[in-house]
Amino acid sequence: MDKFIINGGKRLKGEVNISGAKNATLPIMTATLLAKGNSILHNVPRLIDIKMMSHLLRVLGARVDFHGDVLEIDTTYVNYYEAPYELVSKMRASIYVMGPLLARFGQARVSFPGGCAIGTRPVDLHLKAMEALGAKINIEHGYIKPACKELIGNEINFDKVSVGATANALMTAVLAKGETNIHNAALEPEIGSLIDFLNKMGAQIEGKDTTHLKITGVSKLEPAEMEMIPDRIETGTFLIAGAITKSEITVSNCIPKHIQVLIDRMEDAGYLFEIIGDSIKIYPPQIIKPVDIVTQPYPNFPTDLQAQFLALMTLADGQCTVEDTIFPDRFMHVGELNRLDANILMDKNMAIINGVKSLSGAEIMATDLRASATLVLAGLAARGQTTISRIYHIDRGYERIEEKLQKLGANIKRVRG
Ligand code: UD1
């Protein structure tokens, strides 16, 4: 297994370009299943999760080709409706094939996703949406098997905001007969981007960027072509890389308003920002002020940046707290950060961080995607050498992270295991 070796404590400088968003690309890849023919996606990041989703689409009968950052998906010969355990257990987002398969073929068979390192993650809301549209759901031998003769538009009321369930509900409702209204829909930019793609395919969805989505079903969709939005979590991770190493760096090719809440909280901590078009320059303060955060659905603080922000706060001048209301158990990184001499205590599901003057290098282990990025950030700030093992998690969601950091002047290398 590969490792990262980081010699930390160095300032970074220069500019980094943000790649296309993984979490926008994954549902759009499955949305291509709704039509017959060749869809083309631009600005697609080269990531393990994208490769796994390509593999799943091929298993279903699609042809998937990557040229540079362009992904072509031909769904003409899709003739198989199962997402097998081997794939779903490795990548939860495989559940996104369920809605499109049900809508186009009237059936699907998707392995039940289990828990993962960030806690239990149910799929009841996905199933509730499909049932509301007329599907019968059977669950047997660890597989979810929705089926229907016809999908009929309906009211879908989510009692909790879910990105995945909103995406699956949209991808099912676009081909249902009549009108569907989704209430309490997720507002995340990745949902907006999926709506844009579905509407390009010929769907009729109104209410983008609001919590009420109105879908008027159509009988057929066509393949489409679209550019993927920049990854807001990668944007935030690199801003924190600048922040934690007290460096002035520029993060380019991003959409600043997608991470406004992070910018606001970092301003509270004393950082200054210069935003010009699609680039953000960060200016560090002498002293980092402690700032409490609570993660909540967009536009509030994202759970996918919780760990990275927590790492930054380990160097704050005082005490603060971090709470995750989306995934309350998502604190595997705390023990590893404490190995780097951070001072973090857990009180039930709240992290209490007592800022320290500096972190010091150690051997640590990555546990999940965002926690891995966090350990890299902490390693960049820590004095001396940090070795991070099990970094395969990071390749699921960050495109060439060590190359991008090297370009900013970081001393980081990958040791192939
Ligand atoms: C997506 C993102 C993930 C991000 C998360 C929250 C992708 C591929 N993944 O995950 O990176 O951390 O949004 O922003 O885009 N829930 C239920 N029942 C359900 C579904 C969800 O109770 O049927 C709960 C979850 O346990 C969680 C909350 O709803 O507490 C939000 O989860 P959700 O938005 O669905 O996350 P994902 O779509 O899985």
Image (cartoon, helix red, strand yellow):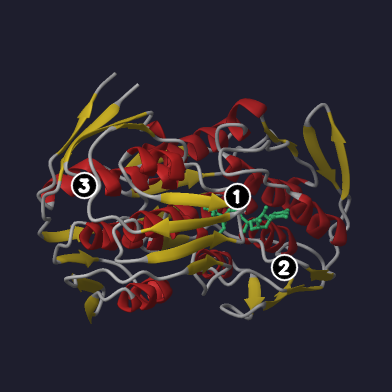
Q: Nearer the viewer, mark 3 or mark 2?
A: 3
Residue placed at 50% from the left, 41% from the top?
332
User: Which amino acid type corresponds to the residue marked 2 in the rendered image?
Assistant: Val
Is 334 displayed left or right of 37 in the figure? left
Q: Which quadrant: the N terminus?
A: top left
Query: How far, Cα to Cα, is label 3 from label 2?
Result: 51 Å
Residue 68 shows in the view: no
Q: How many marks?
A: 3
Mark 3 vs ligand 1: CB under 8 Å? no
Crowd around label 3: few <14 · some 14–19 · many ≥20 (10 Å): many
Is 203 displayed left or right of 10 in the figure? right
Query: How far, Cα to Cα, is label 3 from label 1?
Result: 47 Å
Earlier along the polypeptide chain: callout 3 or callout 1?
1
- Secondary structure, mark 2, is loop
Q: Which residue is mark 2?
A: 218
Q: Which residue is mark 1?
A: 36
Q: Position of residue 267 (x, y in %)?
A: 31, 78
Q: Quadrant of residue 92?
A: top right
Q: Which residue is mark 3?
A: 380
Q: Is residue 415 above or below residue 251?
A: above
User: Which amino acid type corresponds to the residue marked 3 in the rendered image?
Assistant: Leu
Q: Position of residue 28 (x, y in %)?
A: 53, 55
Earlier along the polypeptide chain: callout 3 or callout 2?
2
Would you say the residues marked 3 and 2 are in contact, meaning their CB atoms lie under 8 Å apart? Answer: no
Earlier along the polypeptide chain: callout 1 or callout 2?
1
Foreground of the two, 97 or 358: 358
User: Which amino acid type corresponds to the residue marked 1 in the rendered image?
Assistant: Lys
Q: Which image quadrant shows ligand 1? A: bottom right
Name the disc covering residue 306, or none. Answer: none
